[in-house]
Image (cartoon, rainbow, N blue to C red):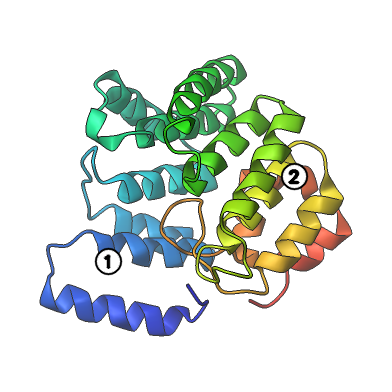
Amino acid sequence: MLRWFPEALRKLDQVLEITPDQIDPIVYKAGIAQAEGDLARAAALLATIHPKAEDVVALETEIYQAILERHPAQMIARIKELLAKPDPVLNFYNSELRFYLGWAQEVAGDEAAAQESWRRALGELESFLNEQPENFTLVGDLALTNAFLGNKDAALALAERGMVIVPLEKDAKDGGWPIEILARVAARVGEPDRAIAALEKVLSIPYEGPVPTTEVPLTPARLRLDPMFDPLRNDPRFQRLANSTP
């Protein structure tokens, strides 16, 4: 996605005029509001929908909203409820949801619970990898989960593997996805130079972003809000990117 948010919003409003009961356009509008740093507008939009377990993008956008607001307690309870009876049709997305559970638990201050969620997510995600070795979304989930568990070498190797699966030179739409994963992994595992280089790249290109899966790319506003980039907060290079004009 290009960062032409006003044009995107106009098109989404047109879709809603034709099919007002669809939740996807509302979710994408909320994703744009998050990208613009307007969490109040995003929250108001998300309050109008009631996603089911199979509405993965909507659920992850709600979770991400709670994480950006740094008040995830209600969403933690909701995720646990959903994972108590996981829908097998969702494949590895149940495990992706478990990764988000761990992230929300960490933001809420429950490190022990977060580690347990990530350990479970890791085992589940790895079980899918043999069947789906070229699934860059799955590889990205594994990279992030390993990073949050402190498995630095594995996390970086998986992030690099994602960039081999969908190289930017051959796939302009999805090629930025694994570069953002690398930025997030590198920030988490204490590789600020690699994180900054990856962030500089993704902020300069149009692409569909992985966190959450609303296809909205990273923006300076989200850099300022996203807890995953907290390790970079005091880096002047990161501060420059976070305060740049999208």
Q: Secondary structure at mark 2?
A: helix
- On screen, residue 4 above or below 178: below
Distance of label 2 from label 1 (alpha carbons): 31 Å
- On screen, residue 220 above or below 66: below
One can see residue 174 in this view: yes
- Label 2 vs 1, first from the N-terminus: 1
One can see residue 233 in this view: no
| Front residue of 156 and 111 | 156
State the image coordinates of residue 109 (x, y, percent, origin top left).
Answer: 59, 25
Residue at position x 63%, y 76% from top? 246
Q: Secondary structure at mark 1?
A: helix
- Name the disc covering residue 201, or none: none
- Name the disc covering residue 187, or none: 2
Residue at position x 43%, y 59% from top? 40
| Front residue of 142 and 70 | 142
State the image coordinates of residue 135 (x, y, percent, origin top left).
Answer: 47, 45
Q: Quadrant of residue 219?
A: bottom right
Left or right: where does residue 162 sit relative to residue 208?
A: right
The amino acid type of the residue labelled 2 equals Ala
Residue at position x 35%, y 23% from top? 80
Labels in figure, total = 2
In the rendered image, which residue does mark 1 sit on? 25
Q: Quadrant of residue 199?
A: bottom right
